Image: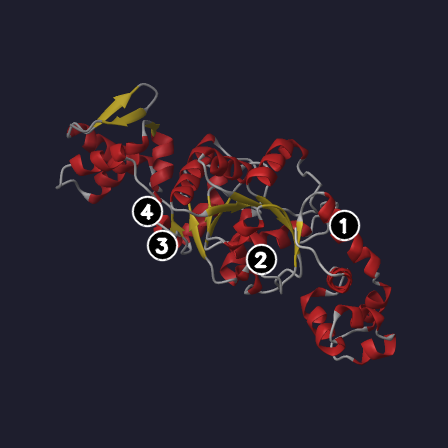
Amino acid sequence: MISWTPDERRERAAYLALALTPGLGTARFALLQQACDSPLGALSAPFAFLRSIPGITKAAATAVRAADPAAGERMLADAERMGAATLLPHDPGFPAALREIPDPPLALFVLGDASLLGRPSIAVVGSRDHTPYGVAACRLVVQAAVQGGAVVVSGMARGIDAVAHAAALDAGGTTVGVLGNGLGVIYPAANRALYERVGREGALVSEYPPGERPRVFAFPRRNRLISGLARATVVVEAAQGSGALITVGAALEQGRDVLGVPGPITAPTSVGVNGLIRDGAAPFLTAEDLERFLPSPPARSVASAAASSMLPADLPAGERRVAEALMAGEVDADHLAGQLGLAASDTLALVTALELRGLVQPLPGARFRLRVP
């Protein structure tokens, strides 16, 4: 924990009190900084002077005059009490990726390893009401990110977010959970064990003061930080109108890449993500689709590499895609079609062609397994 001089601490407390004044916002905060030289100067400035600053409305000036440096000191003390760091934009540990986004956060509170915020990251988001296919697909995406040396970022919600965080840690990787409330508040309550694990083995981050309760407007704002920290955002499952699509919008506004995991066209949880792919998002089909966003290429298992090399050289592209998808293990027809982003009939036609070549073994329950000589 960094030790600040008394003057530095007073300035940081004033900064927090001013930056987190409701209704002020990033643009007006910058105007006050310029006109008043420092947060302490802004908090002590007369009302008439504040009103004379172009862009500072009467309501904003009133809010600044009501701001209390003691509130900033309480934020610092609350963070310290729980072992969390407070990062301001001029601090060396503040993530450079978040300085670049529209409407950057004015402060961050971090529980756990704050250095993870500066490492190459992949965001993984999706539906709260996921399917078994979504869980399996999420784990494949996370495994590729972890093997490629990336931190997995998500929003600590139930569903795909929770699966992504746990899968990253289970795979020996690291993860950052971005909260829509203050540190110390566990929401949803069912994520208590995950909250404690991520805070211990990864990092939890929020732009809201410790102890602040969740509010509806906070979650769309949280989503811009999820995408902002990441080199690319991967959407695993998303119904029409899913909150994951808000993260996609933020990613596109920030100039970040978006990938979607294709899903069965009959599944409501696939409508949103399949629409993204139709509209130009890159599909995630294999680990190699993440390579250009990762510090190092994701490792392929020895068995998978060996099996790939044993596929017939004259295998048509469509059949090769099916065969390579089956290298991860046996799978049912619906999940295979969703993974490939193909209609069920087209998938079964390709599987049948592979069966005729002796490369696929049918199993009970419309499941299939690769059979390489």
Give the residue at mark 2.
Answer: 93
Locate residue 208 relative to residue 363 in the image: left or right.
right
Give the side of residue 364 with respect to residue 4, left or right: left
How far is mark 4 from mark 2, CA to CA? 31 Å
Q: Residues within 10 Å of mark 2 (few under 14, many from 20)?
A: some
* Horizontal side of residue 245 vs 111, given as left or right: left
Crowdedness of circle 4 by 10 Å Cα count: few (<14), some, many (20+)?
Answer: some
Residue, disc 3? 292
Q: Which residue is mark 4?
A: 288
- Please report whichever mark, 4 or 2, sits nearer to the chain's N-terminal start: 2
Query: The residue under label 4 is which amino acid type?
Result: Glu
In terms of sequence position, does the residue under pointer 4 or pointer 1 come before the other?
A: 1
Mark 4 element type: helix
Residue type at tag 2: Gly
- Residue found farthest to the top: 364
Cα distance between the residues tagged 3 and 1 = 42 Å
Q: Check disc 3 and report its element: helix, strand or loop.
A: helix
Percent x, y for residue 56? Answer: 77, 74
Q: Kindly identify the residue that appears in the image at 22 percent across and 38 percent down.
A: 319
Left or right of 277? Residue 22 is: right
Count the numbered circles shown: 4
- CB atoms of marks 1 and 2 within 8 Å: no
Q: Position of residue 244 (x, y in %)?
A: 54, 47
Which mark is in front, 2 or 3? Answer: 2
Give above or below for 296 relative to 237: below
Q: Is residue 210 visible?
A: no
The crowding category of the residue bearing disc 3, from other C-alpha atoms within 10 Å (few below 14, some 14 to 19, many at least 20), is: few
- Eye-nearest disc, 3 or 1: 1
The residue pinned by badge 1 equals 77
